[in-house]
Image (cartoon, rainbow, N blue to C red):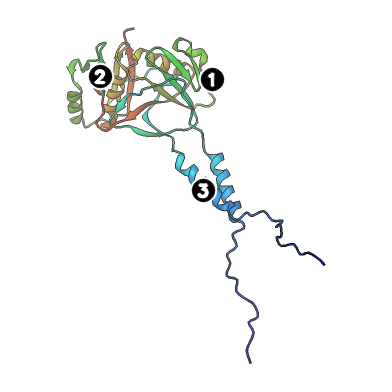
Amino acid sequence: MRIQRLTEISSEIPVASMSDIAFLLIVFFMIVSVFSLEAGFLLKLPDKDQPPLKVADKKIIEVRIGEDNCLTLDQKTVTFAELNACLEHENSHELQYVAIKAHGQSQYKIVVAVIECFRRRGFDKISLKRLGP
Amino acid sequence: MKLKNGHRLQSIIPVASMSDIAFLLLIFMLLSSILAPQPPLRIDPPKVPNTAEVKEEQGLRIYVNAAGLAGINDTLGRLDDLENLLPGIACPEERVFLYADSGCEYEKIDRVLAALKAKAFRHVTLICRETPGGGPLE
């Protein structure tokens, strides 16, 4: 008498769930990945062989940052609020050049804050110079 | 007489190639994504209320902290050796991202800018942290 086998072993690998796994992996990567975005100010450095640009004095707004981080706008000591208020009245900023002269011991965050102040008002011709050591 | 339908409409959607498509998408995402670089120094950038958003592209990353340590990409060194550590510029449009501590003295930043200028780098981004209402007194 022949004995019939009850269970048949399938010779196929089940791949039906493979697409589910792949899509789950895609969703995982999409969730965990973050777009690398930073915030900042773009500066364009002058060419090292380029001679210094000569600009008429009346077109330059000069801001000095002292050793103790105090601000001087056109030889008058000002606070940040006063600097902002002064810049609000400046209309011809397209023609104006800004010279930020910072003391070597002044803090970087103050220099950045002054740059931000001018950039916010549309001044884009900004030069940086170090004073003192 | 009953007419027999010649061909039957299949009610099954073929999904056999779905896994191939999914894996191709997965490989594309893995290849096109850039891993976030690990900074060699812990930096606290200055907080400002408004900045321009800068898309991080491939470029040179310079880190400067208040203690005078400097890092270029993933190499750590001293600020005094920065000019030696700086690579030669690959193209004039190459970007530099400057990450500096908010409490850093300006003299250190000026040295970095001078070194970059000497190596003919022209596009420098001062990295800040945008904080609504933030400012220099924070």
Give the residue type that dot 2 points to.
Glu
**Which residue is under mark 2?**
A62
* Residue B84 in view (yes/no): yes
For residue A12, side relative to residue B45 (left or right): right
Residue B88, label in figure: 1
Marks 2 and 3: in contact by CB < 8 Å? no
Where residue B86 sits in the image (x, y, percent)?
51, 17
Q: Residue furthest front?
A: A1
Position of B66 with respect to B78 (left or right) is: left
Image side of residue B10 versus residue A24, left or right: right
Judge whether residue A122 can be spotted in this image.
no
Q: Which residue in the structure is indicated by mark 3?
A: A24
Same chain letter for marks 3 and 2: yes
Local SS, label 2:
strand
Specify the quadrant of the image occupied by residue B131. Answer: top left
Chain letter for the residue marked with disc 2 in the picture: A
Label 2, label 1: how far apart the Cα atoms are: 34 Å
Amino acid type at mark 3 = Leu
Q: Is residue B15 above or below residue A53?
A: below
